[in-house]
Image (spheres, rainbow, N blue to C red):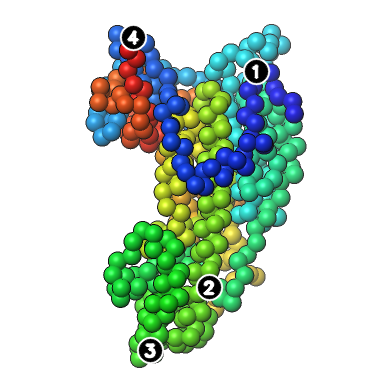
Amino acid sequence: MKHGPGVRPLRFLPAMLSVVVALAVARVADVSAQQPPTFRSSVDLVAVDVQVVDRTGKPIANLKPGDFQVEIGGRKRRVVSVDFIESASVDSASGGAGIEKWRPEQTDAALDEPGSGRTFVLAFDTDSFTVGESRDVVAAARPFIHGLRPNDAVGLYTFPVGPRREPTREHVAVSRDVDTIVGRSQSMTGEYNLSAAEIVDITAEAARDFARANGPLTSASAAGGTAAGAGANANVNAAGGGAQASSVGTMADTALQRVQLRECGALESSCADSIRAEANSKAFYLEGRATEGLNGLRALIQLLGEQPGRKTVVLMSTGIPATDRPGGRPDVGDIAKLLGQDAAATNTTIYTLLVNTRGFQSMASETRKNDRIPTSLSRETAVSSRLLEEFSGASGGALLRVLMGGGEVALNRVLRETSSHYLLGVEPADTDRDGSLRELRVKVGQSGSTIRARSWVVVPKRKT
């Protein structure tokens, strides 16, 4: 495989499988190896890079140290210096990312200068897209790639399977690879029309009923025992619930009862048992898919740690459902938090484009089925986006919602926001200097602005 001049290959093709397997059983133990740069002066300063943009995503310049407030581990720390670093120009008139003209005198040596270009990786969650949806996102990705500057590097990662390429300045080659991406989404087969939010609600209700009858669930039994409990002990509650429900006529106070009325036409125990069993089966499938996808992203981000400087991963997905209720499923534990910490340790920012066009399509008159509409669109979106929003924000990026098309407007915003950033020189306390991850909070006193900053920082130990 050819690589652009000065671009260090990541070797994700042979290494990806082994890293994913390792991630499935253990977290990388030593994130301190990926230490951020420090400034050498009378004191050691930790470098904290942030983006400050206006409502349109255009970077805000001319901010001073006094405009920023930084907390490390919940304690305020002094901002000593501020540098505004521009990686590309922004054409504010068109609202898109302006492309600086590349002059003949700008040789390969100029391309290889540190900080002379940005590094992007386009990541596609192919299992979430239908064939038609994948065509839309591929069509949106092409102008994004073509809008990069010649010294920007771009890579490609698809999961669970599909084309992959290390970041390179051979943009045309990456664009050709993107054209081969095809969605692989398959609907979860089953007797009942269960949505992701209904699966969460039904499993959470089963866990709650089990806890009332048998005591609180442990974290282990909440993850794996909910299905077993729902099939055994919770069946007792289901039968009792069915008998109780029959006494209240057609009143539906729970998600399970609402699905019963919609799918079975009555509140009776055998229907409840079947619905609960199907909810647990589908929750198990969604947990496996989410774990596989997020572990793959963690492997990608850790491999990006081999590449110096700032990196930006642009993830395209229709959503990864996860519970937002205690005891509910699918539940993937703290993997999203770990993903955000990995991003901080490797200087990687994640922008996620949530392509959410199905909800509006389902409401069209030619496709709407009034007797089988599941929960509200807002609730479904919340369940599908929670994980994505959590790790994107923790990495210093954002979740951008795409309601129509394949995401052209959102991708233009990513180019605008990443055209520049601030590098803050922050003075840590001696208690911060243990080489471990610490919570980071950055605020800016600029009205109408949005700040993109990571939620974690590694403060290196003082050199002796």
Q: In which quarter of the image is the N terminus?
A: top right
Is residue 454 placed above or below 460 in the rendered structure?
below
CA gap between label 2 and label 3 equals 21 Å
- Numbered disc 4: secondary structure: loop
Question: Quick check: 124 above or below 57?
Answer: below
- Looking at marks 2 and 3 on the same chain, the residue that comes earlier in the sequence is marked by 3
The circle on residue 41 is 4
Q: What element carries label 3?
A: helix
Question: What crowding class fits label 4: few (fewer than 14 Cα within 10 Å), some (14-19), or many (20 or more)?
Answer: few
The three-letter code of the residue at mark 4 reads Ser
Q: Disc 1 designates what residue?
A: 6
Per the rendering, the mark at residue 243 is: 3
Q: Distance between the residues labelled 3 and 4?
A: 75 Å
| Residue 121 quadrant | top right
The first of marks 1 and 3 along the sequence is: 1
Disc 2 target residue: 278
Query: What residue do we see at 39% from left, 25% from top?
Result: 48
- Residue 131 horizontal/vertical position (percent): 70, 55
Whichever of labels 1 and 2 marks the residue nearer the N terminus, that label is 1
Residue 139 left/right relative to 80: right
Q: Which of 235 and 369 is in front in this view?
A: 235
- SS class of the residue under badge 2? helix
Position of 249 with respect to 282 (left or right) is left
Q: Which mark is residue 288?
A: none
Quarter holding the C terminus?
top left
